[in-house]
Amino acid sequence: MEIKKALAELRKEKKRKFVQTVDLVMNLKNFDVRKEALNTFVSVPHPSEKKLAAFLTKKSKLIDTITEDDFVKYKEMKDIKKLAKKYDAFIAVAPMMGKIATKFGRVFGPMNRMPSPQAGIIPQEKDEMINAMIEKMKKSIRVKNKEMAIKLAVGKEDMDDGELEENITTVIKALEKVLPRGRDNVKEVLIKFTMTKPITIVEAKR
């Protein structure tokens, strides 16, 4: 089904009391998850709002900041999990990464919250670097799969259909570029809202 038609169908579903996320699911084939699992980022032209925080040596006016002095607030595993759930992504200044990994890595790693060299780590605490990384992080979607499917949030239901279509098309093309065998690794692509059933937009080749 065409993306626009699929979005129109999803919008016919029962309205929820919250703004649903638009999810893209790409089911894979001819893919060895153990050897070829992806850990990268793709960018979208129309980002939805993201809640970001930064690990920095001193407080910044530009972003919610966690300094080393704040680490004592996160003694328990539940406190670290709460922090990870509070924000969509984290950035960090490079010299702090070792301490961040030691303190938060066990929780942040599996939850895809660890700042990454590809998107999230800045070399120095300069306002222009922090600002540039904030803008990059807003547009970046993390791709990490441990199974024969890639699941990504590509927007929100309150976005314009044209913007959502552009995001979806951009993400599909970007994923095809990073998959080892490109289009031949794609079994099918589906989109859904948080509470709806998925609709297929790219059929499996027979």
Image (cartoon, rainbow, N blue to C red):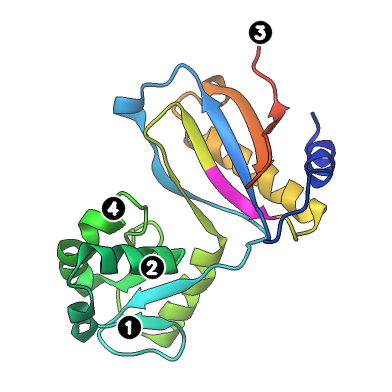
Residue 93 placed where, x, y %? Answer: 29, 74
Q: What secondary structure predominates along the stretch shown in magenta?
A: strand
Identity of the amino acid at label 3?
Arg
Q: Which residue is painted at 21% across and 55% down in the image?
A: 106
Residue 167 visible from this viewpoint: yes
Residue 109's label in the rendered image is: 4
Question: Which marked residue is nearer to the observer: mark 4 or mark 1?
Answer: 4
Residue 90's label in the rendered image is: 2
Q: Are marks 3 and 4 in contact (CB under 8 Å)?
A: no
Which residues lie in the magenta part? Answer: 152-156
Q: How far, Cα to Cα, is label 1 from label 3?
A: 53 Å
Quadrant for the C terminus, please: top right
Query: Mark 3 or mark 4: which comes first in sequence?
Result: 4
Q: Residues within 10 Å of mark 1 (few under 14, many from 20)?
A: some
Residue that carries the numbered disc 1 in the rendered image: 125
Residue 34 placed where, x, y %? Answer: 30, 26
